[in-house]
Amino acid sequence: MYTFSSRLKTFSLVLIIIGALGIGYGFFTAPKTVDDVKAMMHDAEDSHGATAAEHAEVDDHASKVVHEVTGAIKGEHTTENDHAAASEHGDDAGHYEHVLMQAQNRPWTAIYVPMIFFLLISVCALVYYAIQRAASAGWSPVLFRVMEGVTGYIGIGSLIVLAFLVASAMHGNHMFAWMYASADPTAANFDFAMETKDWWLNIPGFLIRAVIYVSIWIGFRHFILKNSRLQDESGDLKYFKRSFNLSVVFLVVFLVSELFMAFDWLMSIDHHWFSQLYSFYVFASMFVSAITVIALVTIYLRSRGFLPQVNDSHIHDLAKYMFAFSIFWTYLWYAQFMLQWYANIPEEATYFYPRLLGEYQPLFIGMLIMNFVFPILVLMNSDYKRIPWFVVLAGLIILTGHYLDVFVMVAPGTVGSHWHFGIPEIGALLFFAGLFIFVVFNSLTKAPLLPKENPFIKESKVFHY
């Protein structure tokens, strides 16, 4: 049996405490009034005059594009006066109110990014585990307990996400702009996009679907792991067959739940934009992150004397999956970006403008390098995949790249050009990383690390590539 080391437990608790302080600091320092926003913008102009002017120029261009899109869809004509009105912020109360909402969204965004990141890592670890079960894989049973441990975060992670979404629905934040829009053309908050999307983007349906998603993930994890434990206790193959059947059904149901989850929790932040590839792109990002976490936990446990049956060939295969799905992620990234940017349809290109040419360009290019260029150069060599410290280094960079990927998915639609990566963001990342470590390694203590009664366990022990 694995014992959660006191040193690692203390480390995770310290991360949680430091992270909670950082989150609290973010909410405490967020501007409360329009006057606070004016003072903040004035200080920014004094310290970064040229940069502030560039930011304003980017915002102006984005405002023009959105105005053109709105006019085109409504059948209206835009004029130079319209552009001037959209660009002249000055003392415009509406503009300052908008900036205030974005600034107040910063601590919420700081929480939302790692909250979603670690939950989807845990869910995709369950997907990877179910794939091994459904394929009756012979190489991986010695890693099953690690996979089960990583899925342990699904329960508490799901509850935290649900609490966040309920807070959003109660207007505790402005993360989802569609929650404040109306499909009624006579309403002051009329949004043309809601005329065709309000049947899906409505608060009751949004929350009901969220409960359905997490119920599917938690429920299937419970029953798959229950049969795994019963098989170890009795050795009866009927439990192995039940796990197989549950895994097959889960993979089908997950594809549907993840499809709509990505629409609801991520794409609806930019609800004027749409992409048919988006859900698959999100899955690819989180799936490779989940495999990477499984590899890191496996290497850590092996370095502490656990998992003696895990050899370099197992590590090699995990690294091979990291490499393969990094390529898969790149394919989907390119397919989504190239087709929409090249077509230059306003409602599609507007989504990529701040990411490719605006304030998020360094993150956008940086995460592409970390998620594609680096894995290609580092993990292509078969020998390097067998070196644990090399896989750890590659894994940490891949995880950083995909965390930035999620950040770039979320932040432009919530904080706009007023993004930062400071104490609130670092604090939230540390908090959820600490909670993830604590829950995962505590889950590993619930059962022996070797599933002895699995019919493929002998094959897995002698596996050699």
Image (spheres, rainbow, N blue to C red):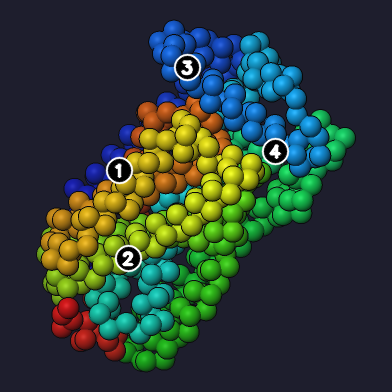
The image shows residue 136, relative to residue 345, as above or below, that is below
Residue 399 x %, y %: 32, 50
| Picture disc at residue 13 | 1
SS state under label 1: helix
Q: Number of marks in the image?
A: 4
Q: Which residue is mark 3?
A: 52
**Marks 3 and 4, how far apart in space?**
26 Å
Who's the residue at 64% across and 20% down the image? Answer: 87
Q: Which residue is mark 2?
A: 324
SS state under label 2: helix
Q: Which residue is mark 4?
A: 69
Image quarter for residue 426?
top left
In this view, the mark in front (2 or 4):
4
The image shows residue 61, relative to residue 353, as above or below, that is above
Earlier residue among tags 1 and 2: 1
**Marks 3 and 2, how far apart in space?**
41 Å
Q: Is residue 292 left or right of residue 244?
A: left
Who's the residue at 15% across and 83% down the image? Answer: 462
**Residue 73 in view (yes/no):** yes
Earlier residue among tags 3 and 2: 3
Earlier residue among tags 3 and 1: 1
Q: Are marks 3 and 2 in contact (CB under 8 Å)?
A: no
Image quarter for residue 33?
top right
Quadrant, the N terminus? bottom left
| Picture disc at residue 360 | none
Q: Are marks 1 and 2 in contact (CB under 8 Å)?
A: no
